[in-house]
Amino acid sequence: MAKQKIIEFDGLQNLVYSTNKETMADIEQGNKNHEPETLEPSKQNLRVWIEKNHRGGKIVTIIKGFEGDEQALKDLGKKLKTYCGTGGSEKNGEIIIQGHHADKVLKFLLDNGYKAKRAGG
């Protein structure tokens, strides 16, 4: 079976590419995706654990379960990194701290009124 050549195709004339996270339906209706409201520390249900999978053998401390907007996550991550004296990142609702600092992170979170538990390995 021979390949058919497309002579004219106007199906892409209405195609719009955007890096905006809102869908076209949201834009047309005027709806905006709001960031989740940041819960107060006593209502946060955080889990702290150690992981080294897929990290080249390096150990990291991960804090999951944060509910709130990205800026609040980044602020908490910055405080934790400063407290531990190390680097890390905040992404996908997780805070990743370089090194084995689970006990230190847990102490910081509990001292600052967060509801946190040690989990995993």
Image (cartoon, grey):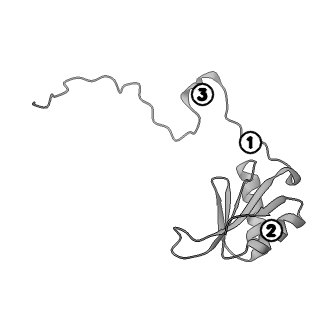
Please state which amino acid type lies under the numbered disc 1: Pro
Q: Nearer the viewer, residue 10 or 34?
A: 34
Q: Quadrant of residue 111?
A: bottom right
Of badges 3 and 2, nearer the viewer stands 2
Q: Which residue in the protein does label 3 denote?
A: 27
Q: Classify mark 3: residues with Cα within 10 Å, few (<14), some (14-19) or many (20+).
A: few
Q: Which residue in the protein does label 2 denote?
A: 106
State how far apart marks 3 and 2 are (Cα): 41 Å
The residue tagged with tag 2: helix, strand or loop?
helix
* Residue pictured at 57% horizontal, 25% vertical: 25
Kindly identify which numbered label has been placed on residue 52: none
* Residue pictured at 74% horizontal, 42% vertical: 36
* Residue pictured at 84% horizontal, 70% vertical: 107
Q: Nearer the viewer, residue 7 or 2?
A: 2
Q: Quadrant of residue 78?
A: bottom right
**Tag 1 near tag 3, CB within 8 Å:** no
Left or right: 48, with 12 as reference point: right
